[in-house]
């Protein structure tokens, strides 16, 4: 496990990983070719690269400089084989949004940042939870999502209010069809995806202490500051104000 900073002097080209990797983007413009990945990956997803993955996932330069940070969990082939004995983990790179996967990786990131005498045991248990979570992943379709579904995902990423039914109407499909197809391609529900996207944007805005929390709530599509505080606290276990102080 490791927190990694992008090397500003190194351009990442095509490369291969022998072990499996779970990647949680934390900061920067991270791009991935994994199935179901958005144009720019953020904290709302975990990228899973199975053993033997060859790719060129990277951080894009911003203002001429490559900057970014991600947390990575590396697992050898035999551990992934353990997951295959009880389920069907993905066989090619995929962006995962399942709450169980996301929670396990985030807890591993927190544990690695505050390592103690008991952390090895805690990390082992969390890694087993993570293996169990990916063992439950449904096999990928192997096809690109239809254009209307890509547009629906983009609309859900935006912070404008509106129901899932209204999004379905904008892309011209029935809400039930949207929900079923969305999970088929992106391994999550439209509602879960929207919630994670809003919270990920809020996390980024909290890093700027000049932006009031009430304004962050409005920008990210929450009805008011109270609604935002409740959702953020449920997801992170800490209120936005305390989260911002911890960042400082």
Image (cartoon, rainbow, N blue to C red):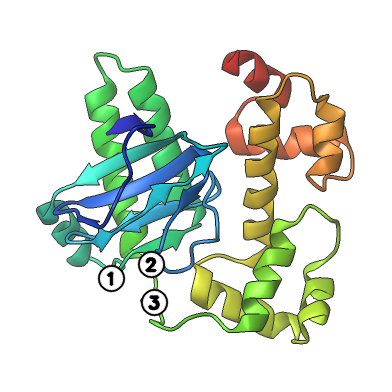
Q: Quadrant of the C terminus?
A: top right
- The residue beneath circle 1 is 88
> Is tag 2's residue or tag 1's residue first in the polypeptide sequence?
1
* Neighbourhood count class around disc 3 (C-alpha, 10 Å): few under 14, some 14–19, many 20 upward: some
Report if residue 239 is visible in the image: no
Which corner quadrant of the image does residue 85 belong to?
A: bottom left
Residue at horizontal 54 percent and vertical 61 percent from the top:
38
Q: Look at the numbered discs 1 and 3 and tell me whether their residues touch, using CB distance below 8 Å.
A: no
Q: What SS does tag 1 mark?
A: loop
Residue 99 in percent (x, y) is at: 51, 52
Residue 8 in percent (x, y) is at: 39, 32
Report if residue 110 is visible in the image: yes
Residue 154 in percent (x, y) is at: 68, 65
- The residue beneath circle 2 is 137
Front position in the image: 103 or 210: 210
Q: What SS does tag 3 mark?
A: loop
Q: Look at the numbered discs 2 and 1 and tell me whether their residues touch, using CB distance below 8 Å.
A: yes
Question: Does residue 10 appear left or right of residue 219 in this picture?
Answer: left
Residue at horizontal 72 percent and vertical 40 percent from the top:
231
- The residue beneath circle 3 is 140
């Amino acid at each position: 496990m490791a927190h990694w900073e992008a090397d500003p002097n190194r351009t990442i080209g095509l490369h291969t990983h022998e072990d499996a990797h779970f990647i949680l983007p934390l900061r920067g413009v991270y791009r991935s070719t994994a199935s179901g990945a958005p144009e720019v990956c953020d904290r709302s997803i975990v990228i899973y690269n199975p053993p033997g993955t060859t790719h060129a996932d990277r951080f894009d330069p911003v203002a001429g400089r490559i900057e970014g940070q991600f947390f990575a969990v590396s697992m050898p082939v035999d551990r992934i084989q353990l997951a295959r004995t009880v389920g069907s983990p993905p066989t090619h790179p995929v962006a995962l949004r399942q709450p169980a996967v996301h929670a396990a990786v985030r807890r591993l990131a927190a544990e690695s940042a505050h390592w103690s005498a008991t952390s090895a045991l805690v990390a082992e248990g969390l890694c087993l939870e993570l293996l169990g979570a990916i063992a439950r992943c449904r096999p990928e379709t192997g096809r690109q999502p239809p254009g209307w579904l890509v547009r629906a995902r983009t609309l859900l990423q935006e912070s404008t209010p509106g129901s899932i039914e209204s999004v379905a109407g904008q892309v011209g499909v029935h809400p039930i069809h949207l929900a079923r197809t969305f999970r088929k391609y992106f391994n999550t529900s439209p509602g879960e995806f929207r919630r994670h996207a809003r919270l990920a944007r809020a996390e980024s805005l909290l890093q700027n202490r000049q932006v009031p929390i009430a304004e962050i709530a409005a920008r990210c599509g929450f009805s008011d500051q109270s609604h935002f505080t409740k959702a953020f606290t449920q997801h992170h276990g800490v209120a936005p104000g305390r989260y911002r102080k911890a960042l400082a």
